Amino acid sequence: STPSSSINISLTYFNNAPTLISNLNSQTIGNEPVEISLIEKFNDPDNDPLKFTVSSSSPDIAKVTLNDSKLIINPIKSG
């Protein structure tokens, strides 16, 4: 018979949530698109790459898109 042994390994990974480093102030949108660099607004304490998603709560008033880490707000109509 061959002797056997086992080893149990337990790993615990702690991931800290990204933090806000600069406020996203209220924006008054005119007729031109507004760009906001999100990478300048958020930080990850673990230095993990940040991934952003954006959506508009009023798509009939403003269309929002993401270009790399830049939020682009395109006005459609006043609201």
Image: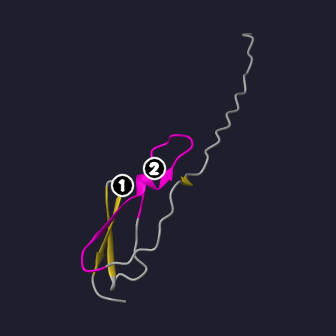
Q: Quadrant of the C terminus?
A: bottom left
User: What element does badge 2 sit on?
Assistant: loop
Characterize the magenta stretch by its predominant secondary structure. loop
- Closer to the chain start, of discs 2 and 1, is 2
Place residue 32 in its image quadrant: bottom left
Across and down, in percent, residue 19 comes to: 56, 53
Label 1 CA crowd tier, 10 Å (few <14, some 14–19, many 20+): some
Magenta span = 30-53
Is 26 placed above or below 53 here? below
Residue 69 disc label = 1
Residue at 73%, 15% in the rendered image: 4
Give the mark count: 2
User: What element does badge 1 sit on?
Assistant: loop
Find disc 2 in the rendering and name its residue: 50
Tell me the CA gap for discs 2 and 1.
9 Å
Is 57 placed above or below 4 here? below
Residue at 27%, 72% in the rendered image: 33
Across and down, in percent, residue 63 comes to: 31, 76
Q: Is residue 11 visible?
A: yes
Residue sitting farthest toward the bottom: 79
Is 33 placed above or below 59 here? above
Q: Are marks 2 and 1 in contact (CB under 8 Å)?
A: yes
Callout 1 amino acid: Ser
Label 2 CA crowd tier, 10 Å (few <14, some 14–19, many 20+): few
